[in-house]
Image (cartoon, rainbow, N blue to C red):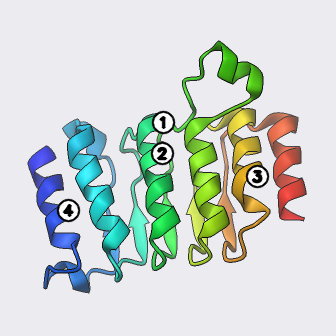
């Protein structure tokens, strides 16, 4: 639950003897524990500073748009993470009418911007993360074209449609 997540956040700080040895962390299905924003925020802050973790699995954590934005900020700073799994998290922006017209997708945009700055991430798994065409386009537009490190990108089951697929194809070619 929240207390465990807060403890893990402390453990992952570079000043922790134990956390400095962890290279892989699987935190699947924590949505069952109803993690709150404070607990996830503390974990994210630790991940920004951690220099040993190379694989992070956050599949099925109910991160939502806010969690996706937080992960985007982590990726923009962390330069040791090589593999990130955000599958089965609803990352699609809950767009208001004006954002919908402009094609914005907040979490995909933040993750995309982070990819533009992050050359250490080699694998990004976003299976069934509800990106949709706007999220796929935002991911492509804001980061994939500039990213030089990513070698495996899995977007299965995101209903990207022709718009998102085309944008991704353009960014990757």
Q: Is residue 34 visible?
A: yes
For the residue labelled by badge 4, is the local secondary structure a helix, a strand or a loop? helix
Cα distance between the residues tagged 4 and 3: 31 Å
For the residue labelled by badge 3, is the local secondary structure a helix, a strand or a loop? helix
Dot placed on the residue nearer the N-terminal end, 4 or 3: 4
Dot placed on the residue nearer the N-terminal end, 2 or 4: 4
Residue neighbourhood size for the residue with mark 2, other residues' Cα within 10 Å, grouped as few (<14), some (14–19), many (≥20): many
For the residue labelled by badge 2, is the local secondary structure a helix, a strand or a loop? helix
Mark 2 lies on residue: 68
Residue under the point 42% across and 73% down: 55
Cα distance between the residues tagged 3 and 1: 17 Å
Residue under the point 86% across and 36% down: 163
Residue under the point 83% across and 45% down: 165
Residue neighbourhood size for the residue with mark 3, other residues' Cα within 10 Å, grouped as few (<14), some (14–19), many (≥20): many
> Which picture quadrant has residue 158?
top right
> Which picture quadrant has residue 74?
bottom left
Dot placed on the residue nearer the N-terminal end, 2 or 3: 2
For the residue labelled by badge 1, is the local secondary structure a helix, a strand or a loop? helix
Q: Is residue 112 left or right of residue 69?
A: right
Q: Is residue 136 left or right of residue 9?
A: right
Mark 4 lies on residue: 9
Dot placed on the residue nearer the N-terminal end, 4 or 1: 4
Q: Is residue 130 visible?
A: no
Q: Is residue 140 left or right of residue 82?
A: right
Res 10 label: none
Mark 1 lies on residue: 65
Instruction: Look at the numbered discs 2 and 1 and tell me whether their residues touch, using CB distance below 8 Å.
Output: yes
Please identify the quadrant where the C terminus is shown: bottom right
Mark 3 lies on residue: 140
């Amino acid at each position: 639950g929240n207390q465990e997540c807060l403890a893990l956040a402390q453990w992952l700080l570079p000043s922790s003897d134990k956390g400095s040895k962890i290279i892989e962390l699987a935190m699947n299905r924590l949505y069952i524990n109803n993690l709150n924003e404070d607990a996830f925020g503390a974990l994210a802050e630790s991940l920004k500073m951690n220099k040993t973790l190379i694989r992070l699995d956050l599949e099925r954590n109910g991160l939502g748009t806010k969690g996706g934005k937080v992960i985007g900020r982590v990726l923009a700073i962390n330069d040791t993470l090589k593999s990130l799994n955000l599958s089965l998290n609803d990352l699609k922006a809950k767009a208001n009418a004006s954002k919908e017209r402009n094609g914005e997708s907040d979490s995909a945009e933040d993750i995309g911007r982070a990819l533009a700055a992050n050359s250490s991430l080699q694998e990004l798994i976003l299976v069934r993360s509800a990106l949709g065409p706007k999220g796929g386009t935002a991911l492509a537009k804001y980061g994939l074209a500039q990213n030089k490190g990513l070698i495996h990108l899995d977007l299965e089951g995101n209903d990207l449609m022709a718009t998102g697929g085309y944008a991704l194809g353009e960014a990757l070619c």
